[in-house]
Amino acid sequence: MEKGKKNYTKLILLLVIMAMTIAIYGCHVSPSKDGGSREGVASIIGVSQANMREEWRIALINELRAETEKSPDIQVITTDATGSVDKQLQDIDNLIGYGIDLLIISPCDEVEMGDKIKEVYDSGIPVIVMDRAVEGFDYTLYIGPDNEVIGQQAGSYIAGLLGDKGGNVVELSGSPTSIQGSERLLGFRDAIRDYPDINVKKLYLGAESKDASYDMIIAAKSIIEKSDVIFAYSDNMALGVCDAVRDLGLEDKVMIVDCDGFKGADEGIDLVSKGRLKATVSCPIGGKEAIDYALSILHKESGVPKQVILRSYLITAENIDENLSLMNAAVADDGETIKVGYSQVGQESNWRLANTRSIEEAAKVFNIDLHMEIADQSQERQFEAIRGFIEEGVDVIVVSPVVETGWDEVLREAKAAGIPVIMSDRNVSVEDREENLTTTYLGADFMEEGRRAMRWIRDNVKTDDGKKAIMEIMGNEGASPTEERGKGFREILADNPSYYIAYSSHGDFTFEGGRRVVREYLEKNEWDIDIIFAQNDDMALGAIEELKAHGIKPDEDVKIVSVDATKDAFEAMVKGELSCAVECNPVIGDQLMKAIRDLHCHKQMPFRIITEEKVYDQLIAEDYISKRIY
């Protein structure tokens, strides 16, 4: 009898634990191996969280839950991997066993979880990756912040606060294993590097918590008394700092700036509103966007991108109401026609022609009244077009810029007219990021394209017979694809000393430019190049023709890697002349038009929207060539 009572007690305890788990983690279904009960449920979304220790992860779960409550036919099963890769692998298997229709995952480790994410994606279950991006594009969508940019925003603001006279800044570092913390600190240090009169004292906490921050500030009283600003990279740390500074009687002397900017009592925005924080840089959680895109994916809507990099905002007492109204704004698309002015850079390549065609076709589907002006590689023409759009009174302006710089004046004119500007395919660099002269960037990740090109070279061009010489054929000088593809290429090159760039020249993204670079090299040198990296297909194809004219066999005597992956490039791979093509997808019309409609109905726009791209070489070119539409 006593034994029966113990078993009964254990059973009751087990049931209580299960009930508490469901209450905490939002499991609203009765799962089973065959998918569980789906009565009244259109879709089940599985959420695999890396851990529930970090404050923002709890905020993410709360935001996901709040968004799904708006759709009663959507249910969520949430798991906590407690920071363990092994447990997260098991969690995902369990979620699949429950019959989920879509997986949202914040990976414990982006490297170790990459294969599992690919396995789920390849099985036909859509996967939204959050926070930590895995290498490659074997997932449906990535959503996350740019923590380095968040740190840069905080650093730039602090530099502005201190002015020319400079001052003393205390930098708080929390957990050494915090990736987001490390990235924010990297951005912060980068922003203040050029200010020699700013003296930084680093304090290491060992833990990213309110209590650890409080104790450190109290213990470092002599340092704090001489400081002008304290920078903490999270709301949790900042609250401890605020309490410690208050208890030291230094509230009126020391300013505090942090990152996160969460809503809620004693979070960043609340602390700014109370005057306890000088400023916070918001880190959008992404739960709202995850559910919004999850519904689009489940409903098979067009226009879903590959990556969404969320925008962060500097929030101060002066702009807090404006930012809160943006965060809390109701969104609804009234379906009315949107008038859009588009300044297209030119018609310099097959890629650009396909890009223009994709945009024009999508505009009709999304009820966009599109007015497109072709600039023929002239920035002055683009200025004229933008000013014409302003005078015309369009709702949105889209620009694919010739070069990165020189846009500040005309973009300020658009902002003054109340017309938002989206950058498409290429981005711009403005003097003051906090002016928010552009709304978002939509297009490729050019740095990743450069990285992929060099990774293919590393993995496929052997160096057994010595170091390999690379010829780099670049695009237009000053264009963002040129700068960023080169930077990404060199990032991977730096870790592979068996390869080196022997010659680099601009081919201006044209067929003739590619021919010219090879011809000019041969006029002065015997051919001793092992690899050509051309930053677009047209230049690669021009280089191939010039090589053949001089009796040099493409792919045999020299490996050739390009970016774009147009049909012409596939034909060259099938012929055995082009070695590899890294895709830069021009077919972005649906994603662009969806972004325009989202902007029109007052959704918060991401910092960057990245399109889907792959890598192709001769081994698979013939399998895909018939599917190319550009």
Image (spheres, rainbow, N blue to C red):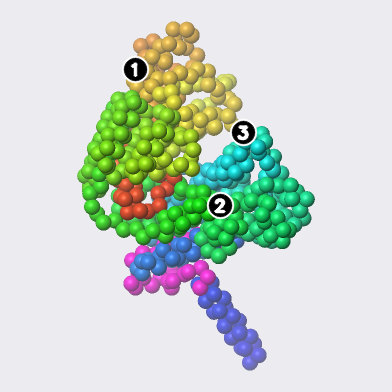
Q: Position of residue 335 (x, y in %)?
A: 24, 54
Few, some or many residues within 10 Å of mark 3 (<14, 14–19, 20+) = few
Residue most extreme to the bottom: 1
**Mark 2 — residue?**
280
Quadrant where the N terminus is found in the figure: bottom right
Tell me the kind of residue under disc 2: Thr
Look at the image and say whether residue 45 sits in the magenta stretch: yes
Q: Position of residue 541 (x, y in %)?
A: 35, 22
State how far apart marks 1 and 2 are (Cα). Answer: 51 Å
Q: Residue at x 32, y 30 (%)?
A: 382
Q: Quadrant of residue 67?
A: bottom left
Tell me the kind of residue under disc 3: Asp
Residue 512 marker: 1
Look at the image and say whether residue 89 sits in the magenta stretch: no
Q: Quadrant of residue 10?
A: bottom right
- Which one is earlier in the sequence, the residue at label 3 or at label 1? 3
- Which one is earlier in the sequence, the residue at label 2 or at label 3? 3
When the figure is inspected, residue 312 is found, relative to residue 560, above or below; the finding is below
Q: Residue at x 57, y 76 (%)?
A: 17
Secondary structure predominantly adopted by residues drawn in magenta: loop
Quadrant where the C terminus is found in the figure: top left
Mark 3 or 1, which is nearer the eye? 3
Numbered range of the magenta stretch: 23-52
**Mark 3 — residue?**
194
Tell me the kind of residue under disc 1: Glu
When the figure is inspected, residue 465 is found, relative to residue 49, above or below; the finding is above
Which secondary structure lies at badge 3?
A: loop
Q: Residue at x 47, y 29 (%)?
A: 483
Relative side of 20 to 608, left or right: right
Which secondary structure lies at badge 1?
A: helix
